[in-house]
């Protein structure tokens, strides 16, 4: 689903997505509806400007193994 114009997660929660690239802001609670998601790419997304962005996303979505095309280390988890 890379380079998409997704603005809502409704309807996607039933799909077995393991990889998602988002360039628009999506409420964090909606991403929790994707329990199989392991690879999340938010490069170019406005959320990257938040302080401690990477650590915050890893904390919120502890099931991720890759964030922004970089493997999440044991130390980060």
Image (cartoon, rainbow, N blue to C red):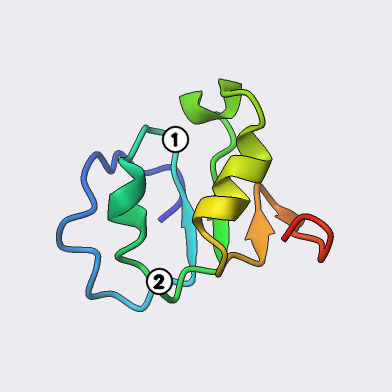
Q: Earlier in the sequence, mark 1 or mark 2?
A: 2
**Identity of the residue drawn at 50% across and 53% down:** 60
Tell whether 6 sits left or right of 58. left
**Residue extending furthest left?**
11
Q: Position of residue 35 (x, y in %)?
A: 40, 73
For residue 23, the mark is 1
Task: For mark 1, give the secondary structure.
Answer: loop
**Identity of the residue drawn at 81% across and 66% down:** 74
For residue 17, the mark is 2
Tell whether 52 sits left or right of 47. right
State the residue in front, 46 or 6: 46
Q: Quadrant of the C terminus?
A: bottom right
How many labels were placed on the picture?
A: 2
**Identity of the residue drawn at 54% across and 41% down:** 42
Q: CA distance from mark 1 to mark 2?
A: 17 Å
For residue 70, the mark is none
Q: Position of residue 54 (x, y in %)?
A: 66, 41
Whether 63 is drawn above or below 28: the answer is below
**Dot 2: few (<14), some (14–19), or many (≥20) neighbours within 10 Å?**
some
Viewer can see residue 35: yes
Mark 1 touches mark 2? (CB < 8 Å): no
**Dot 1: few (<14), some (14–19), or many (≥20) neighbours within 10 Å?**
some
Tell whether 73 sits left or right of 4. right
Whether 6 is drawn above or below 37: the answer is above
Q: Position of residue 4 (x, y in %)?
A: 36, 44
Task: For mark 2, give the secondary structure.
Answer: loop
Viewer can see residue 45: no
> In terms of image quadrants, where is residue 24?
top left
**Identity of the residue drawn at 81% across and 61% down:** 73
Q: Position of residue 2 (x, y in %)?
A: 46, 50
State the residue in front, 74 or 69: 74
């Amino acid at each position: 689903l890379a380079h998409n114009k997704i603005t809502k997660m409704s309807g996607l929660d039933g799909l077995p997505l393991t990889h998602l690239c988002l360039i628009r802001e999506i409420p964090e609670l909606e991403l929790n509806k994707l329990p199989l998601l392991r690879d999340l790419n938010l490069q170019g997304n406005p959320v990257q400007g938040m302080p401690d962005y990477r650590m915050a996303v890893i904390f919120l979505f502890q099931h991720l193994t890759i964030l922004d095309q970089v493997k999440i280390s044991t130390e980060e988890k």
